[in-house]
């Protein structure tokens, strides 16, 4: 919803000073203006002397923290922050999450969603910090079970570690986006950090495109988060992305994603592959046993009684379902590594290696 900026900032002020505040972040900048700090974070904390409003500002070099007493002192500190020409405010309270973005015309685009968790003043020794809390109201809209929420948060951590410091402007493509958990979460995280961000989710399924577009409209971010139906190799995206994401793109789709990212000359690629069906099918075609039950006795007697050879090793490894599965899943990255090392251009090799290194779990060490 677009509203006059002063009205929307007055609402943000009331939320920041309300005891129900959980956390708020201000970042980004308005057209033609520069705030005195890059980012500000406001949250209630419980100290020995009682509840305080903690304000952490970052001038781009280092954070500066102060804890102000609720009342006139907090009011003055909040007014000073609201006077800064930040481009975005993201406010979480016990009841709602409010996102304010200042448009190019200087108006406020406000999105409000209900919160689903109670807020408490945070102690300093919190058990775990998420980049996007599993209880974030965004997940109410987009769905996803606890494992998917943790997976998305882990991916955002990889993103935050790789794209650091965050640039002011980012164009992102999520290849094989499926239900777009990561697409929306990446938008939410980056916009919350004040990045001027556009995201396009690509999936081969037209029904996913329709569903995800409707969701973006409901969430009020359809101008910034768009969806295209098409293949990873050929889908039409109307910008050249800086950052390419691919989370669990099926089978060899991860390889297509890496290739597309290189063709786009994307600065960053974060890819976490899914399964290893393609290589498994090829290994099945070799005539090696694929469904034999695990039998350690047989495997050890086979290796002890005959001279070791690569073929026999392969046969022994294939005899155990668990070993077979692990072996296949490490053959996939090994093949990617071999492909990458034989890639003709040094720049392409460097890009693939960089993308691979930033993705935990599938790149053999020392690559
Ligand atoms: C396992 S889902 C992962 C979805 C999402 N990235 C996530 O992690 O929740 C893989 C998605 O990739 C899509 N996909 C697979 N191969 C593709 C291709 N070549 N081009 C476009 N989409 C593809 C599928 O339709 C599916 O929605």
Image (cartoon, rainbow, N blue to C red):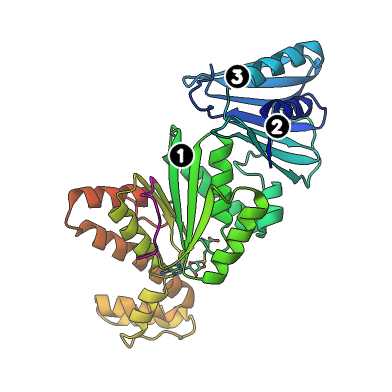
Specify whether residue 239 is painted magenta.
Answer: yes
Kindly identify which residue carries mark 2.
Answer: 23
Q: Image quarter for residue 72? A: top right
In front: mark 3 or mark 2? 3
User: Badge 2, how many Cα within 10 Å: few under 14, some, many 20+?
Assistant: many
> Which stretch did the figure color magenta?
232-242
SS class, disc 1: helix
Q: Image quarter for residue 71? A: top right
Q: On the rendered structure, is 345 left or right of 188?
A: left
Q: Residue at x 48, y 80 (%)?
A: 294
Kindly identify which residue carries mark 3.
Answer: 84
Do tag 3 and tag 1 residues touch (Cβ < 8 Å)?
no
Kindly identify which residue carries mark 1.
Answer: 161
Q: Residue at x 56, y 32 (%)?
A: 105
In front: mark 2 or mark 1? 2
Specify whether residue 295 is painted magenta.
Answer: no
Q: Disc 1, ligand 1: is the CB inside 8 Å? A: no
User: Badge 3, how many Cα within 10 Å: few under 14, some, many 20+?
Assistant: some
User: Badge 1, how many Cα within 10 Å: few under 14, some, many 20+?
Assistant: few
Query: Counting residues from the N terminus, which is met first, the one under dot 3 or under dot 2?
Result: 2
Disc 3/disc 1 C-alpha distance (Å): 28 Å
Query: Counting residues from the N terminus, which is met first, the one under dot 2 or under dot 1?
Result: 2
Disc 2/disc 1 C-alpha distance (Å): 22 Å
Q: Is residue 91 above or below residue 325?
A: above
Q: Nearer the viewer, residue 327 or 285?
A: 285
Residue 248 visible in the picture:
no
Query: Counting residues from the N terminus, which is met first, the one under dot 3 or under dot 1?
Result: 3
Q: Is residue 123 above or below residue 353?
A: above
């Amino acid at each position: 919803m677009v509203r006059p900026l002063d009205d929307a900032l007055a609402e943000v002020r009331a939320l920041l000073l309300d005891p129900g505040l959980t956390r708020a972040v201000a970042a980004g900048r308005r057209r033609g203006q520069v705030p005195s700090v890059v980012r500000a974070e406001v949250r209630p904390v419980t100290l020995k002397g009682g509840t305080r409003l903690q304000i952490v500002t970052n001038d781009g070099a280092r954070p500066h923290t102060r804890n102000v007493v609720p009342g006139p002192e907090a009011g003055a500190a909040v007014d000073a922050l609201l006077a800064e020409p930040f481009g975005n405010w993201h406010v979480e309270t016990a009841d709602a999450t409010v996102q304010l973005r200042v448009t190019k015309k200087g108006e406020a685009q406000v999105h409000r969603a209900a919160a689903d968790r109670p807020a408490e003043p945070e102690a300093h020794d919190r058990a775990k910090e998420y980049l996007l809390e599993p209880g974030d109201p965004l997940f109410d809209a987009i769905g996803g079970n606890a494992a998917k929420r943790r997976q998305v948060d882990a991916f955002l951590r990889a993103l935050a570690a790789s794209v650091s410091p965050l640039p002011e402007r980012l164009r992102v493509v999520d290849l094989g986006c499926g239900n777009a958990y990561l697409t929306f979460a990446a938008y939410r995280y980056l916009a919350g950090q004040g990045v001027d961000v556009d995201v396009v989710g690509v999936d081969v399924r037209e029904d996913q495109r329709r569903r995800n577009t409707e969701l973006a409209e409901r969430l009020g971010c359809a101008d910034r988060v768009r969806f295209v139906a098409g293949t990873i190799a050929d889908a039409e995206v109307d910008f050249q992305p800086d950052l390419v994401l691919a989370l669990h793109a099926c089978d060899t789709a991860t390889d297509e994603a890496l290739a597309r990212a290189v063709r786009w000359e994307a600065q960053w690629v974060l890819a976490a592959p899914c399964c290893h069906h393609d290589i498994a099918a090829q290994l099945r075609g070799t005539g090696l046993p694929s469904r034999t039950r695990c039998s350690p006795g047989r495997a050890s007697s086979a290796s002890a009684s005959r001279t070791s050879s690569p073929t026999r090793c392969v046969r022994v490894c294939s005899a155990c379902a668990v070993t077979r599965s692990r072996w296949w899943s490490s053959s996939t990255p090994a093949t990617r590594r071999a492909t990458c090392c034989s890639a003709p251009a040094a720049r392409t090799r460097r890009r693939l290696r960089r993308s691979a290194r930033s993705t935990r779990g599938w790149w053999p060490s020392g690559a």
